[in-house]
Image: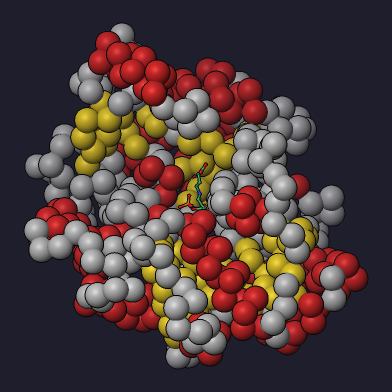
Amino acid sequence: MTTTANDITYRLEQKRRVQADFPGPKSIALTERRKAVVAAGVASTVPVFVADADGGIIHDVDGNSFIDLGSGIAVTSVGASDPAVVGAVKEAVEHFTHTCFMVTPYEGYVAVAEQLNRLTPGEHEKRTVLFNSGAEAVENAVKVARLATGRDAVVAFDHAYHGRTNLTMALTAKAMPYKTNFGPFAPEVYRMPMSYPYREENPAITGAEAAKRAITMIEKQIGGEQVAAIIIEPIQGEGGFIVPAEGFLPALAAWARDKGVVFIADEVQSGFCRTGEWFAVNHEGVVPDIITMAKGIAGGMPLSAITGRADLLDAVHPGGLGGTYGGNPVACAAALASIGSMEQYGLNARAKHIEELALGKLRELASEQPVVGDVRGRGAMLAIELVQAGSKEPNPELTKAVAAACLKEGVIILTCGTYGNVIRLLPPLVISDELLLDGLQVLAAAIKANA
Ligand code: PLZ
């Protein structure tokens, strides 16, 4: 057991170690079995199979250990086997695995709703509904907004990612791999320009001006009074960890309020201490009408939620919202425990500390390496955008090569971005400083070696 400054104890040794024959024989055998039975459409970033995970470390079935800088795509913020979550799951599962909240309700669901109503921004009266996945939360936020406003149109943004179901594919911006040949898509979805400071034609454009650009298009192409909802990720995830210019989100939210448009913040990736606040909208004091949550909410158990204005959510007729598994009792127990751990470990402060440690290193790297075009993000949601030296031309080949080189050295790094040229860092918030710094040093070396 080792301990960090935050008094987090680990079950597994927090150290990377990759053998020469990587991937090892057990992972290779499992990959063969997998190929015969699992659909090819499901791809995996890393060619090894997991045996155990804890803190900032993932062990594979061949005895390799990797530094986890991805958290299973921003899920295991409290770690993949946080003792409080594990204990709560064990306790819950020994009593009942499921009854269906729509049939025979249980306290855990209500307790999660109380926590979400408390933690989400705004002092107004709120209501919560629980689901299973991020996409399902987004679908339901749009359902509520349409019913409550009596309007059809939904505005999404360039570079957006909202899921893989039919409506959320329509909301998602990127064709390959998410949408190509999967249509036809849900109607009444309109896409507007995002504020993407690094790639603006006019780099001096302010957040307010970028919002005005989108609002003018909305008013010209749809008409404000036709719009049910604007949905936006306050920091875009899959699209490239794009942090909009300051003032962009507040201006959009103000316009939405003025026009009776429901402002939905999709915090599926950015929520729950990831950016150093409970939610990324908090950085600019934006109060969404509805907020969608998943991923970090339940320490790895599948749970998602929408929390929003009581008048909007209670507009829906009884029986209009639900699903067999939504708010599963074991997932609710995990959520309560993981929220408890976030508070106990002080994970907002910890995410800010990670930002301090990592941003400095990444900026240093950018100043030495002209292929690092941009460094951005908040808290433990950080990224670098890789380009051809001397231009802003995206460099997806280098991005792939760097991620592969890191993996060989025992560091799991995820890529993202509309142009496939962004390396994103999403470490578990409980990662130790030593492990994080080791991972960053491997990343820096991989960029130097491949640039
Ligand atoms: N909204 C902002 O980031 C999920 C998806 C990875 P689900 N992002 C990771 C992939 O390739 O499928 C996401 C998100 C935002 C919605 C979702 C969807 O959440 O739980 O994957 O449905």
Question: On screen, 385 above or below 90?
Answer: above
- Of 443 and 267, nearer the camera is 267
Question: On screen, 67 above or below 109?
Answer: above
Residue 433, quarter of picture:
top left
Q: Residue 272 in the image: state x and y as whole percent.
A: 39, 63
Q: Residue 267 in the image: state x and y as whole percent.
A: 50, 63
Question: Dividing the image into 4 quarters, which one contains the N terminus?
Answer: top left
Q: Is residue 89 visible?
A: yes
Tally the marks: 0
- Of 416 and 145, nearer the camera is 145
Q: Can residue 254 be seen in this view?
A: no
Q: Which residue is drawn at 27% across and 30% down?
A: 50
Q: Which residue is drawn at 88% across and 67% down?
A: 221
Q: How is the image coloured?
A: secondary structure
- Of 314 and 59, nearer the camera is 314
Q: Residue 30 in the image: state x and y as whole percent.
A: 31, 19
Question: Dividing the image into 4 quarters, which one contains the C terminus?
Answer: top right
Q: Which residue is drawn at 39% across and 80% down?
A: 117
Q: Residue 199 in the image: state x and y as whole percent.
A: 75, 47
Considering every residue shown, the one lying at the far right of the view is 220
Q: Which residue is drawn at 39% across and 39% down?
A: 69
In the picture, measured across the screen, residue 180 lies left or right of residue 130, that is right
Question: On screen, 219 above or below 232?
Answer: below
- Of 448 and 314, nearer the camera is 314
